C-alpha cells in the first residue's frame, strides 16, 4: 500500500486513506523526503462544543495530556520524546484539538506509542490541573485593565472583531472561566470525545512499510463510542453599534481602523470567491492608502469566523489625526470599485499568485500534513478537494457581484486608539501640575483671609 510511484508522490491531493474497524480515519502520504515523518492526530472536539462557562475545557485537557504519565511528570514525558529525536505540540481550535508530532522516521512507531500513552494514561491530578490552568491564563494573555473594562474595551490583537462578535451575540464576553473546571468534567470530556470514531490520524513522510499493520494493531484497539450531539452554533441575536471606539492604551499617536462586514453566502464557490476578492481589495487598499496617499504602511484584510458568521474586515494602522480621512477613503474606494467593476487583468494577475501559493505553501512534510489537517472536511475516497479548481472557476463578474452584495450588508466601524495623544497627555499633565500648585495656594489665601476676619471682630 505504501509503495507509490513518483507521479503519485507528486500529486499532493492523492493519499492512502481508509478507516479502521473502530471508525478511526487514517490518512497516509509517503513522500520523497527521507528520514522524517509529520504526524497529526485530530480529535473532533474544540471550543465550539461548549458554552461560554465551559469553553476552555478542551484546551485544559489538551495541556494536561502533556503533564506526565508517571512520577517523572511533564519533564519526564518531554525527555522521552527528546530521546526519540522528536518534538510535539498541540492546538485547540473551534472545531478540533490536534496533536502535532515531528519525528525521525526510524522512531515513528515509538513516537505514536508515546502519544497514545499520553492521551490515555495521564492521571488528571488536582496539582496538574491547577498547573495547566496557570499556563492557560498566561497563554490567553493579559485581561483588560480596570480602565479598559470601565471604557468597554477588551485586550488582545483581535479586540475589535471580538468586541463586535460579542455585541452580536456570537462570541463570549468577559474573562475566560477556568476556576470551576474540575477533574470530573475533564474525565467526562476524555471519555465522551476522545474515542476512535472521533479521530483522524495523518502521517506524511518516510513511512515505515510495517506501519499499516502497526496502526491496525495499536490504534485499532482504541474503543469507539457514542458521539455526543454537536452543539448548535449561535446565530446573531443582537444589534451592534455601527461605530465604536476602543481604547487600547493610555497614550499614543497610532490608531487602528477596522471596517467590518458580515460575509453573505454567495454559493458553491463561496470560499474561493471571498479569498480572491480579499486579495484584490488588499492590493487596491495598499495602492490607495499607502502608495498614493501615504496614510498607512501596511493595510490588511482579514477573514474570520465567529460561531455561525464569517466576517470580512478591512484594517489599517494610521496616525490619530488621519482616522477620518482613512475611513472616508475606504468607503469611497469600495463604492467606486462596486460602481466601475474590478479590473480583469488585475484579477488574473492575483489569481496567478493565489494558484502559485497553493503549490509552494504545501512544500515539505510538515506543511503537507498541515494542509491535510485543515482540509479534512473535503477528503473523499482517497483525495482531497483541489482548492485551485475553485480559484480557476471564479470570474470577474462573480467578484463584482460579491462586492456589491457585501456593500449591501451593514458595516461596522471600530477604531482602536490610546485614550490620549501625547499632546493631550502633556496638556493633562501640565493642567494637573498647575492645579496641584494653585489649589494649595488658594486654600492658603482663604485660610489667611478667614484668620484676618476673626482678628478684626470685637470681643463680646
Image: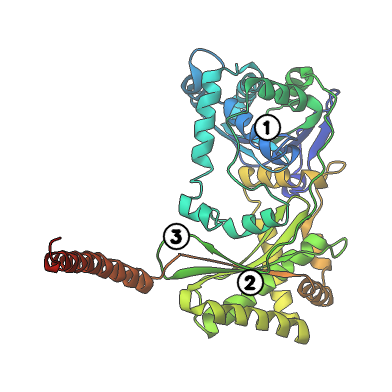
Q: Nearer the viewer, residue 299 or 162?
A: 162
Q: Using the rendered view, name the quadrant where residue 110 is placed.
A: top right
User: Given the current orientation, which residue lies at the most extreme front position?
Assistant: 460
- Contact between marks 3 and 2 (CB within 8 A): the answer is no
User: Which residue lies under the disc numbered 3?
Assistant: 249
Q: Residues within 10 Å of mark 1 (few under 14, many from 20)?
A: many
Q: Residues within 10 Å of mark 2 (few under 14, many from 20)?
A: some
Looking at marks 3 and 2 on the same chain, the residue that comes earlier in the sequence is marked by: 3
Front: mark 2 or 1? 2
User: Which residue lies under the disc numbered 2?
Assistant: 282
Q: What residue is drawn where x is 25% and y is 64%? A: 436
Report the Cα–Cα distance between label 3 and label 2. Answer: 27 Å
Q: What residue is drawn where x is 75% and y is 65%? A: 274
In the picture, the quarter occupied by the C terminus is bottom left
Report the Cα–Cα distance between label 2 and label 1. Answer: 41 Å
What element does badge 3 sit on? loop
Res 207 label? 1
Q: Position of residue 142 (x, y in %)?
A: 48, 46
User: Given the current orientation, which residue lies at the most extreme top position?
Assistant: 71
Q: Position of residue 72 (x, y in %)?
A: 48, 15
Q: Position of residue 80 (x, y in %)?
A: 51, 21
What element does badge 1 sit on? loop
Amino acid at each position: 500500500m505504501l509503495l507509490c510511484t513518483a507521479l503519485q508522490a507528486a500529486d499532493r491531493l492523492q493519499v492512502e486513506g481508509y478507516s479502521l474497524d473502530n471508525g478511526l480515519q487514517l490518512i497516509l502520504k509517503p513522500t520523497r523526503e527521507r528520514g522524517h515523518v509529520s504526524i497529526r492526530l485530530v480529535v473532533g472536539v474544540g471550543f465550539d462544543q461548549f458554552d461560554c462557562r465551559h469553553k476552555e475545557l478542551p484546551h485544559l485537557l489538551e495541556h494536561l495530556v502533556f503533564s506526565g504519565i508517571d512520577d517523572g511528570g511533564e519533564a519526564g514525558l518531554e525527555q522521552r520524546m527528546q530521546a526519540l529525536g522528536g518534538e510535539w505540540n498541540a492546538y485547540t481550535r473551534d472545531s478540533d484539538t490536534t496533536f502535532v508530532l515531528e519525528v525521525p522516521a526510524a522512531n515513528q512507531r515509538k513516537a505514536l506509542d508515546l502519544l497514545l500513552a499520553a492521551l490515555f494514561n495521564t492521571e488528571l491530578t488536582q496539582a496538574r490541573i491547577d498547573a495547566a490552568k496557570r499556563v492557560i491564563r498566561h497563554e490567553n494573555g493579559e485581561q483588560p485593565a480596570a480602565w479598559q473594562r470601565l471604557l468597554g474595551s477588551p485586550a488582545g490583537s483581535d479586540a475589535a472583531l471580538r468586541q463586535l462578535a460579542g455585541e452580536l451575540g456570537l462570541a463570549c464576553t468577559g474573562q475566560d472561566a477556568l476556576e470551576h473546571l474540575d477533574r470530573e468534567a475533564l474525565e467526562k470530556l476524555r471519555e465522551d470525545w476522545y474515542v476512535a470514531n472521533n479521530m483522524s490520524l495523518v502521517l506524511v513522510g518516510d513511512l515505515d512499510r510495517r506501519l499499516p499493520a502497526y496502526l491496525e494493531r495499536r490504534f485499532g484497539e482504541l474503543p469507539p463510542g457514542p458521539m455526543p450531539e454537536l452543539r448548535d452554533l449561535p446565530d446573531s441575536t443582537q444589534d451592534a453599534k455601527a461605530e465604536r471606539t476602543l481604547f487600547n492604551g493610555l497614550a499614543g499617536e497610532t490608531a487602528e481602523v477596522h471596517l467590518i462586514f458580515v460575509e453573505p453566502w454567495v454559493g458553491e464557490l463561496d470560499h474561493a470567491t471571498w479569498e480572491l476578492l480579499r486579495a484584490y481589495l488588499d492590493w487596491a487598499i495598499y495602492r490607495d492608502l499607502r502608495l498614493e496617499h501615504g496614510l498607512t504602511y501596511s493595510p490588511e484584510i482579514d477573514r474570520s469566523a465567529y460561531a455561525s458568521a464569517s466576517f470580512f474586515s478591512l484594517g489599517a494602522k494610521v496616525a490619530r489625526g488621519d482616522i477620518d480621512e482613512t475611513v472616508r477613503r475606504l468607503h469611497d474606494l469600495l463604492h467606486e470599485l462596486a460602481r466601475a467593476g474590478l479590473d480583469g487583468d488585475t484579477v488574473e494577475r492575483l489569481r496567478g499568485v493565489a494558484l502559485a501559493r497553493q503549490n509552494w505553501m504545501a512544500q515539505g512534510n510538515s506543511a503537507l500534513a498541515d494542509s491535510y489537517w485543515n482540509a479534512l472536511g473535503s477528503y473523499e475516497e482517497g483525495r482531497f478537494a483541489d482548492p485551485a479548481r475553485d480559484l480557476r472557476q471564479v470570474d470577474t463578474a462573480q467578484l463584482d457581484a460579491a462586492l456589491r452584495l457585501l456593500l449591501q450588508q451593514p458595516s461596522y466601524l471600530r477604531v482602536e486608539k490610546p485614550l490620549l495623544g501625547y499632546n493631550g497627555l502633556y496638556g493633562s499633565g501640565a493642567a494637573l501640575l498647575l492645579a496641584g500648585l494653585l489649589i494649595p495656594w488658594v486654600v492658603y489665601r482663604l485660610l489667611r483671609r478667614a484668620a484676618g476676619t476673626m482678628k478684626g471682630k470685637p470681643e463680646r
